[in-house]
Image (tube, rainbow, N blue to C red):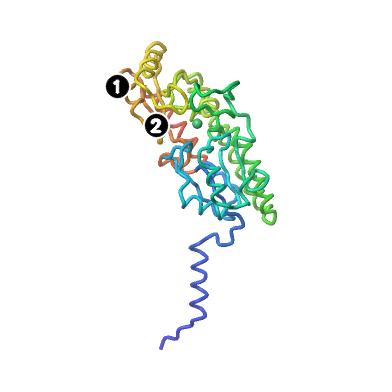
């Protein structure tokens, strides 16, 4: 006869429950605006946090709907990590307000903006409406520069420790480990990028501004007539002129941008169109911050080698 021990069953069920909702003991509940900051938070917090990313690599982080599921996630968060510099201006303040969560209303408590801690490129001297949807605080797409991300990682670690000092040593250890690996990888990326130095490209929006800055790539034209505005045929003709005159070989865009304009350019000239992952999850290779940068280098180096 088989005797069933209910106590054991309930204990193992409890264990199962813990495992399935892991980390049930999470001290920190993180709401990341974009996948790159979810990935960075993961590096530092390990399994000590629950992490949720509000967007995927295939979503335009400028435009997100403040839908109820996002409000619910923010209501439970005690740390919100975003690019900042107004990238999320169109949706983050709405989520903060509707979540009614006092813990994540300000950078004085549970809000962290990456762009607050690094030098932002392209801060306009003066902004008016005629310039399009210009980022007034400079370009917020800072995550594609490994040098800037090293700084952001350090600051984020301090923020996380301030919110959960009990686990401070573990966060610090994770950061030290990340930092060591990041330094080695950054050196490798810099070496690998030599052939890309001085490369001239056409791009879409200023999404890759910091990547180009790191790799020494120069953007000579943009598919957007003005930041945030979709390509027009008149504007594309002027881009075509530049491509022909300067013999530009590459036009790059992200997975969340419409590729029609890049394809049109490819049809008209010998230019190669190349989709690059904007962030983690942007293609199969880019599963974390390391492989994201590896993927950029592989794709760019392949593109110039085969041209
Ligand atoms: Zn932007």
Left or right of 80? Residue 109 is right
Q: Residue at x 38, y 24 (%)?
A: 231
The quarter of the picture where residue 234 lies is top left
Is the residue marked by circle 2 packed among few (<14), some (14-19), or many (20+) residues within 10 Å?
A: some
Report whether 266 appears left or right of 179: left
Pick the residue in front: 154 or 186: 154
What's the CA distance linking mark 2 and mark 1? 16 Å
Q: In the rendered image, which quarter is residue 246 located in?
A: top left
Q: In this view, which residue lies farthest toward the bottom? A: 1
Q: Which mark is residue 275?
A: 2
Which SS class for mark 1?
helix
Picture mark count: 2
Seen from the viewer's position, the closer of residues 149 and 205 is 205
In the figure, 120 relative to 4: above or below? Answer: above
User: What mark, if any, has residue 267 been given in the picture?
Assistant: 1
Query: Which label's residue is closer to the chain start, 2 or 1?
Result: 1
């Amino acid at each position: 006869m088989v005797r069933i021990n209910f106590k054991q069953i309930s204990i193992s069920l409890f264990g199962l429950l813990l495992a399935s909702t892991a980390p049930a003991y999470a001290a920190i509940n993180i709401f990341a605006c974009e996948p790159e900051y979810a990935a960075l938070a993961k590096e530092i917090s390990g399994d000590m946090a629950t992490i949720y990313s509000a967007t995927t690599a295939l979503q335009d982080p400028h435009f997100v709907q403040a839908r109820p599921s996002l409000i619910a996630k923010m209501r439970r968060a005690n740390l919100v990590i975003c690019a900042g510099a107004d990238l999320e201006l169109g949706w983050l303040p709405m989520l903060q307000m509707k979540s009614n969560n006092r813990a994540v209303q300000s950078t004085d408590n549970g809000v962290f903006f990456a762009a607050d801690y690094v030098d932002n490129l392209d801060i306009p001297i003066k902004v008016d409406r005629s310039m399009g949807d210009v980022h007034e605080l400079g370009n917020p797409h800072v995550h594609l520069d490994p040098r800037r991300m090293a700084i952001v990682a350090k600051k984020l670690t301090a923020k996380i420790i301030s919110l959960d000092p009990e686990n401070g040593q573990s966060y610090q250890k994770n950061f030290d480990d990340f930092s060591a690996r990041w330094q080695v990888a950054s050196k490798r990326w810099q070496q690998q990028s030599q052939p890309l130095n001085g490369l001239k490209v056409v791009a879409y929006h200023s999404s890759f501004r910091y990547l180009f800055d790191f790799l020494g790539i120069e953007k000579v034209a943009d598919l957007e007539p003005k930041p945030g505005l979709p390509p027009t045929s008149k504007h594309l003709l002027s881009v075509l002129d530049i491509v022909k005159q300067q013999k530009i070989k590459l036009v790059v865009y992200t997975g969340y941008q419409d590729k029609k304009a890049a394809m049109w350019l490819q049809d008209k000239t010998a230019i190669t169109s190349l989709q690059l992952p904007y962030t983690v999850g942007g293609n199969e290779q880019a599963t974390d911050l390391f492989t994201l940068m590896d993927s950029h280098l592989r794709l760019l180096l392949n593109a110039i080698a085969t041209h």
